[in-house]
Image (cartoon, rainbow, N blue to C red):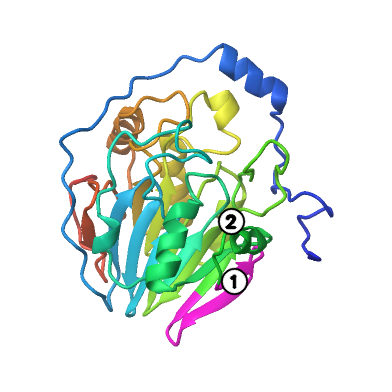
Amino acid sequence: MTVNSSHFDGRHFHNIIPRRNGFGALLRWLISRRHGPWREVTDAQFGAPPPSSSEQLRVTFVNHSTFLLQVAGVNILTDPIWSYRASPVSWAGPRRFRPPGIRLEDVPRIDVVLISHNHYDHMDIATLRRLASEHSPVIYTALRNGRFLAKHGIGNVVELDWWQSGMLGPEAKLTAVPAQHFSARTPFDRDRMLWCGFVVEANGSRIYFAGDTGMGPHFAQIAQQFPAVDLAILPIGAYRPEWFMGEVHMSPTEAVAAHLQLGARVSVACHFGTFDLADDGQDEPLEVLRDVLRKTNLGETEFWVHGFGEGRDVPAQVRERKQIMR
Protein backbone atom coordinates (compact mmCIF):
# COMPACT_ATOMS: atom_id res chain seq x y z
CA MET A 1 0.00 0.00 0.00
CA THR A 2 1.39 3.37 -1.03
CA VAL A 3 1.43 5.94 1.77
CA ASN A 4 1.64 9.63 0.99
CA SER A 5 2.30 11.33 4.31
CA SER A 6 4.73 14.00 5.48
CA HIS A 7 5.61 11.90 8.55
CA PHE A 8 6.34 8.65 6.67
CA ASP A 9 9.78 7.92 5.14
CA GLY A 10 8.75 4.91 3.09
CA ARG A 11 9.24 2.41 5.93
CA HIS A 12 8.53 4.12 9.23
CA PHE A 13 6.25 6.79 10.62
CA HIS A 14 7.70 9.61 12.72
CA ASN A 15 6.64 11.88 15.57
CA ILE A 16 6.78 15.66 15.37
CA ILE A 17 9.60 15.42 17.92
CA PRO A 18 11.81 12.38 17.17
CA ARG A 19 12.24 9.91 20.01
CA ARG A 20 15.75 9.60 21.44
CA ASN A 21 15.44 6.46 23.56
CA GLY A 22 16.31 3.20 21.88
CA PHE A 23 17.18 -0.36 22.86
CA GLY A 24 20.01 0.75 25.14
CA ALA A 25 17.64 2.97 27.12
CA LEU A 26 15.17 0.09 27.38
CA LEU A 27 17.86 -2.15 28.87
CA ARG A 28 18.87 0.61 31.30
CA TRP A 29 15.27 0.86 32.51
CA LEU A 30 14.78 -2.88 32.84
CA ILE A 31 18.00 -3.26 34.85
CA SER A 32 17.26 -0.35 37.20
CA ARG A 33 13.49 -0.67 37.69
CA ARG A 34 11.91 0.63 40.90
CA HIS A 35 8.46 -0.77 40.62
CA GLY A 36 5.48 0.65 42.52
CA PRO A 37 2.93 -1.66 44.20
CA TRP A 38 -0.09 -3.20 42.49
CA ARG A 39 -2.85 -5.29 44.06
CA GLU A 40 -5.66 -7.48 42.81
CA VAL A 41 -9.05 -5.74 42.97
CA THR A 42 -11.43 -8.52 44.01
CA ASP A 43 -14.44 -6.54 45.21
CA ALA A 44 -15.15 -4.53 42.04
CA GLN A 45 -18.77 -4.26 40.93
CA PHE A 46 -19.96 -3.88 37.35
CA GLY A 47 -21.55 -0.56 36.54
CA ALA A 48 -25.15 -0.29 35.40
CA PRO A 49 -25.77 -0.85 31.68
CA PRO A 50 -25.44 2.51 29.88
CA PRO A 51 -28.46 4.04 28.13
CA SER A 52 -29.14 2.88 24.58
CA SER A 53 -28.21 6.28 23.16
CA SER A 54 -27.94 9.97 24.01
CA GLU A 55 -28.36 13.16 22.04
CA GLN A 56 -26.32 15.18 24.53
CA LEU A 57 -22.76 14.23 25.38
CA ARG A 58 -22.36 11.37 27.84
CA VAL A 59 -19.10 9.63 28.75
CA THR A 60 -18.77 6.25 30.49
CA PHE A 61 -15.44 4.86 31.73
CA VAL A 62 -14.99 1.12 31.13
CA ASN A 63 -11.29 0.64 31.94
CA HIS A 64 -7.82 1.75 30.84
CA SER A 65 -8.43 3.85 27.68
CA THR A 66 -11.82 2.33 26.88
CA PHE A 67 -14.70 4.82 27.07
CA LEU A 68 -18.21 4.77 25.72
CA LEU A 69 -18.99 8.15 24.17
CA GLN A 70 -22.64 8.85 23.41
CA VAL A 71 -23.63 11.97 21.48
CA ALA A 72 -26.03 12.87 18.66
CA GLY A 73 -27.48 9.35 18.80
CA VAL A 74 -24.07 7.83 17.96
CA ASN A 75 -22.38 5.30 20.27
CA ILE A 76 -18.57 5.31 20.12
CA LEU A 77 -16.04 3.04 21.85
CA THR A 78 -12.43 4.15 22.25
CA ASP A 79 -9.55 1.63 22.24
CA PRO A 80 -11.79 -1.20 23.49
CA ILE A 81 -10.24 -3.96 25.58
CA TRP A 82 -12.17 -6.54 27.59
CA SER A 83 -9.51 -9.27 27.46
CA TYR A 84 -7.74 -10.50 30.58
CA ARG A 85 -4.30 -9.81 29.12
CA ALA A 86 -2.93 -7.06 26.88
CA SER A 87 -0.72 -9.56 25.10
CA PRO A 88 -0.39 -11.76 22.01
CA VAL A 89 -0.67 -14.87 24.21
CA SER A 90 -3.05 -15.93 26.98
CA TRP A 91 -0.35 -17.15 29.37
CA ALA A 92 2.01 -14.16 29.60
CA GLY A 93 2.11 -10.40 29.28
CA PRO A 94 0.37 -7.58 31.18
CA ARG A 95 -2.76 -8.83 32.89
CA ARG A 96 -5.58 -6.83 34.31
CA PHE A 97 -5.68 -6.12 38.05
CA ARG A 98 -9.37 -5.28 37.99
CA PRO A 99 -12.28 -6.29 35.76
CA PRO A 100 -13.80 -3.89 33.23
CA GLY A 101 -16.29 -1.49 34.77
CA ILE A 102 -18.99 -2.47 32.27
CA ARG A 103 -19.65 -5.96 30.92
CA LEU A 104 -19.25 -6.19 27.16
CA GLU A 105 -22.69 -7.76 26.87
CA ASP A 106 -24.17 -4.68 28.57
CA VAL A 107 -22.88 -2.08 26.12
CA PRO A 108 -25.51 -0.65 23.76
CA ARG A 109 -25.34 -0.91 19.99
CA ILE A 110 -21.88 0.32 18.98
CA ASP A 111 -21.79 2.40 15.81
CA VAL A 112 -18.15 3.47 15.79
CA VAL A 113 -14.88 2.19 17.26
CA LEU A 114 -11.81 4.42 17.50
CA ILE A 115 -8.38 2.73 17.62
CA SER A 116 -5.55 5.13 18.36
CA HIS A 117 -2.66 2.71 17.71
CA ASN A 118 -1.70 -0.93 17.56
CA HIS A 119 -0.33 -1.67 21.06
CA TYR A 120 -2.00 -4.65 22.71
CA ASP A 121 -3.66 -2.59 25.43
CA HIS A 122 -5.33 -0.40 22.78
CA MET A 123 -5.88 -2.73 19.81
CA ASP A 124 -7.27 -5.91 21.36
CA ILE A 125 -8.09 -8.38 18.60
CA ALA A 126 -10.37 -10.62 20.69
CA THR A 127 -12.53 -7.66 21.72
CA LEU A 128 -12.59 -6.23 18.19
CA ARG A 129 -13.65 -9.57 16.71
CA ARG A 130 -16.56 -9.79 19.10
CA LEU A 131 -17.59 -6.21 18.45
CA ALA A 132 -17.38 -6.78 14.70
CA SER A 133 -19.52 -9.93 14.98
CA GLU A 134 -22.17 -8.53 17.32
CA HIS A 135 -22.30 -4.83 16.40
CA SER A 136 -20.71 -4.37 12.94
CA PRO A 137 -19.29 -0.92 13.80
CA VAL A 138 -17.23 1.26 11.53
CA ILE A 139 -13.67 1.19 12.86
CA TYR A 140 -11.57 4.33 12.48
CA THR A 141 -7.84 4.10 12.94
CA ALA A 142 -4.58 5.53 11.64
CA LEU A 143 -2.70 4.62 8.45
CA ARG A 144 -1.65 1.03 7.75
CA ASN A 145 -3.65 -0.49 10.63
CA GLY A 146 -6.51 -1.62 8.39
CA ARG A 147 -4.55 -4.29 6.56
CA PHE A 148 -3.42 -5.80 9.86
CA LEU A 149 -7.01 -5.89 11.15
CA ALA A 150 -8.22 -7.46 7.91
CA LYS A 151 -5.73 -10.32 8.40
CA HIS A 152 -7.57 -11.07 11.64
CA GLY A 153 -11.00 -11.03 10.00
CA ILE A 154 -11.91 -7.52 11.12
CA GLY A 155 -13.29 -5.33 8.36
CA ASN A 156 -15.25 -2.13 7.86
CA VAL A 157 -12.10 -0.15 8.69
CA VAL A 158 -11.41 3.45 7.68
CA GLU A 159 -7.79 4.63 7.87
CA LEU A 160 -6.94 8.29 8.43
CA ASP A 161 -3.73 10.27 8.40
CA TRP A 162 -3.19 13.10 10.87
CA TRP A 163 -5.63 15.94 10.13
CA GLN A 164 -7.77 13.83 7.80
CA SER A 165 -11.51 13.71 8.55
CA GLY A 166 -14.50 11.46 8.02
CA MET A 167 -18.22 11.64 8.76
CA LEU A 168 -19.74 9.49 11.51
CA GLY A 169 -23.25 10.53 10.56
CA PRO A 170 -25.25 13.55 9.40
CA GLU A 171 -24.36 15.48 12.55
CA ALA A 172 -21.04 13.93 13.55
CA LYS A 173 -17.53 14.45 12.15
CA LEU A 174 -14.24 12.78 13.10
CA THR A 175 -10.68 14.03 12.61
CA ALA A 176 -7.47 12.11 13.31
CA VAL A 177 -4.90 14.29 15.07
CA PRO A 178 -1.21 13.88 15.95
CA ALA A 179 0.08 12.09 19.03
CA GLN A 180 3.60 11.69 20.45
CA HIS A 181 3.95 7.93 20.61
CA PHE A 182 4.99 4.87 18.55
CA SER A 183 3.63 1.58 17.26
CA ALA A 184 4.68 -2.07 17.48
CA ARG A 185 3.12 -5.51 17.78
CA THR A 186 6.43 -7.40 17.50
CA PRO A 187 10.14 -6.53 17.74
CA PHE A 188 10.21 -6.29 13.93
CA ASP A 189 7.38 -3.90 13.00
CA ARG A 190 8.18 -0.82 15.07
CA ASP A 191 6.59 2.35 13.68
CA ARG A 192 5.29 0.59 10.56
CA MET A 193 1.72 1.62 11.45
CA LEU A 194 0.67 5.14 12.41
CA TRP A 195 -0.62 6.28 15.81
CA CYS A 196 -3.03 9.15 16.45
CA GLY A 197 -5.63 10.82 18.63
CA PHE A 198 -9.14 11.79 17.52
CA VAL A 199 -11.43 14.80 17.66
CA VAL A 200 -15.19 14.15 17.37
CA GLU A 201 -17.54 17.03 16.58
CA ALA A 202 -21.23 16.25 17.06
CA ASN A 203 -24.37 18.11 18.10
CA GLY A 204 -22.43 21.21 19.12
CA SER A 205 -19.95 19.23 21.23
CA ARG A 206 -16.23 18.80 20.56
CA ILE A 207 -14.50 15.73 22.06
CA TYR A 208 -10.76 15.00 22.04
CA PHE A 209 -9.51 11.47 22.71
CA ALA A 210 -5.72 11.56 23.08
CA GLY A 211 -5.01 7.83 22.87
CA ASP A 212 -1.46 7.30 24.14
CA THR A 213 0.77 10.34 23.92
CA GLY A 214 3.67 12.14 25.47
CA MET A 215 3.73 15.90 25.84
CA GLY A 216 4.52 17.79 22.66
CA PRO A 217 3.69 20.61 20.24
CA HIS A 218 0.67 18.72 18.91
CA PHE A 219 -1.43 20.02 21.81
CA ALA A 220 -0.97 23.60 20.66
CA GLN A 221 -1.77 22.54 17.09
CA ILE A 222 -4.94 20.75 18.18
CA ALA A 223 -6.01 23.72 20.32
CA GLN A 224 -5.54 26.04 17.35
CA GLN A 225 -7.44 23.79 14.97
CA PHE A 226 -10.17 22.87 17.47
CA PRO A 227 -10.68 25.66 20.00
CA ALA A 228 -13.16 25.24 22.85
CA VAL A 229 -12.92 21.48 23.41
CA ASP A 230 -15.84 20.35 25.55
CA LEU A 231 -14.37 17.01 26.67
CA ALA A 232 -10.75 15.85 26.59
CA ILE A 233 -9.82 12.27 27.52
CA LEU A 234 -6.20 12.41 28.69
CA PRO A 235 -3.82 9.62 29.82
CA ILE A 236 -2.12 9.91 33.22
CA GLY A 237 -0.50 6.51 33.85
CA ALA A 238 2.49 4.37 32.79
CA TYR A 239 4.73 7.43 33.09
CA ARG A 240 7.58 6.31 35.38
CA PRO A 241 10.50 6.50 35.04
CA GLU A 242 9.89 9.84 33.37
CA TRP A 243 13.32 9.96 31.72
CA PHE A 244 12.28 6.90 29.69
CA MET A 245 8.49 6.95 29.50
CA GLY A 246 8.15 10.71 29.07
CA GLU A 247 8.76 10.52 25.34
CA VAL A 248 5.57 8.53 24.82
CA HIS A 249 3.41 8.83 27.98
CA MET A 250 2.26 11.93 29.85
CA SER A 251 2.60 12.27 33.59
CA PRO A 252 -0.40 13.49 35.63
CA THR A 253 1.30 16.89 35.85
CA GLU A 254 1.62 17.04 32.07
CA ALA A 255 -1.98 15.91 31.64
CA VAL A 256 -3.17 18.93 33.65
CA ALA A 257 -0.90 21.17 31.56
CA ALA A 258 -2.39 19.65 28.39
CA HIS A 259 -5.90 20.25 29.75
CA LEU A 260 -5.12 23.92 30.19
CA GLN A 261 -3.33 24.21 26.86
CA LEU A 262 -6.28 22.65 25.06
CA GLY A 263 -8.69 25.00 26.81
CA ALA A 264 -10.92 22.00 27.58
CA ARG A 265 -14.09 22.65 29.58
CA VAL A 266 -13.87 19.16 31.07
CA SER A 267 -11.05 16.61 30.98
CA VAL A 268 -11.27 12.99 32.10
CA ALA A 269 -8.33 10.84 33.23
CA CYS A 270 -7.58 7.53 31.54
CA HIS A 271 -4.80 4.92 31.22
CA PHE A 272 -4.50 4.04 34.93
CA GLY A 273 -5.42 1.37 37.43
CA THR A 274 -5.97 -1.63 35.13
CA PHE A 275 -2.71 -2.84 33.54
CA ASP A 276 0.74 -2.64 35.13
CA LEU A 277 2.81 -1.22 32.26
CA ALA A 278 5.58 0.88 33.84
CA ASP A 279 7.07 1.70 37.25
CA ASP A 280 4.30 3.86 38.71
CA GLY A 281 2.18 2.01 41.25
CA GLN A 282 -1.49 1.32 40.85
CA ASP A 283 -2.68 4.35 42.86
CA GLU A 284 0.22 6.70 42.13
CA PRO A 285 -1.17 8.44 39.00
CA LEU A 286 -4.40 9.40 40.79
CA GLU A 287 -2.57 10.50 43.93
CA VAL A 288 -0.24 12.73 41.92
CA LEU A 289 -3.14 14.06 39.83
CA ARG A 290 -5.11 15.02 42.94
CA ASP A 291 -2.08 16.79 44.38
CA VAL A 292 -1.49 18.72 41.14
CA LEU A 293 -5.14 19.72 40.89
CA ARG A 294 -5.15 21.01 44.46
CA LYS A 295 -2.31 23.35 43.50
CA THR A 296 -3.61 24.40 40.08
CA ASN A 297 -6.13 27.09 39.24
CA LEU A 298 -8.39 25.51 36.63
CA GLY A 299 -10.60 28.56 36.38
CA GLU A 300 -14.08 27.48 35.28
CA THR A 301 -12.87 24.20 33.84
CA GLU A 302 -12.91 20.75 35.45
CA PHE A 303 -10.75 17.63 35.52
CA TRP A 304 -12.75 14.51 36.33
CA VAL A 305 -11.78 11.04 37.48
CA HIS A 306 -14.52 8.53 36.75
CA GLY A 307 -15.05 5.42 38.79
CA PHE A 308 -14.77 2.22 36.76
CA GLY A 309 -18.14 1.76 35.09
CA GLU A 310 -19.27 5.29 35.91
CA GLY A 311 -21.08 7.38 33.32
CA ARG A 312 -21.67 11.12 33.43
CA ASP A 313 -23.41 13.67 31.27
CA VAL A 314 -21.10 16.50 30.23
CA PRO A 315 -23.07 19.67 30.91
CA ALA A 316 -23.88 21.87 27.95
CA GLN A 317 -22.93 24.94 29.96
CA VAL A 318 -20.16 25.30 32.51
CA ARG A 319 -21.50 25.64 36.02
CA GLU A 320 -19.41 27.10 38.79
CA ARG A 321 -18.16 24.39 41.11
CA LYS A 322 -15.81 24.64 44.04
CA GLN A 323 -14.68 21.02 43.94
CA ILE A 324 -11.85 20.30 41.53
CA MET A 325 -12.59 16.56 41.60
CA ARG A 326 -15.65 14.53 42.47
Q: Which mark is residue 265?
A: none
Which dot, 2 or 1, sits closer to the camera?
1
Residues in magenta?
Answer: 156-173
Q: Which residue is mark 2?
A: 196
Find the residue positioned furthest to the right: 10
Left or right: residue 164 versus residue 288 is right
Give the x, y percent position of residue 141: 57, 63
**Residue at the spot x=61%, y=35% of the render?**
247
Camera-side residue: 190 or 243?
190
Give the x, y percent position of residue 52: 23, 74
- The reply to whether dot 2 and dot 1 touch (C-beta < 8 Å) is no
Position of the N terminus by quadrant: bottom right
Camera-side residue: 134 or 68?
134
Residues under labels 2 and 1: Cα distance? 13 Å
Q: Which residue is mark 1?
A: 158
Q: On the image, which quarter does residue 95 sit in?
A: top left
How packed is label 2: few (under 14 Cα within 10 Å), some, or many (20 or more)?
Answer: many
Q: Is residue 58 visible?
A: yes
User: Does the magenta portion include 157?
Assistant: yes
Give the x, y percent position of residue 117: 57, 52
**Residue at the spot x=42%, y=39% of the render?**
85
Give the x, y percent position of residue 237: 42, 36
Q: Earlier in the sequence, mark 2 or mark 1?
A: 1
Q: Answer above or below: position of 221 versus 191.
A: below
**Residue at the spot x=33%, y=29% of the render?**
282
Q: Report helix, strand or loop for mark 2.
A: loop
Q: Answer above or below: position of 228 versus 255.
A: below
Q: Report helix, strand or loop for mark 1.
A: strand
At label 2, the amino acid type is Cys
At label 1, the amino acid type is Val
Camera-side residue: 129 or 276?
129
* Most common SS among magenta residues: strand
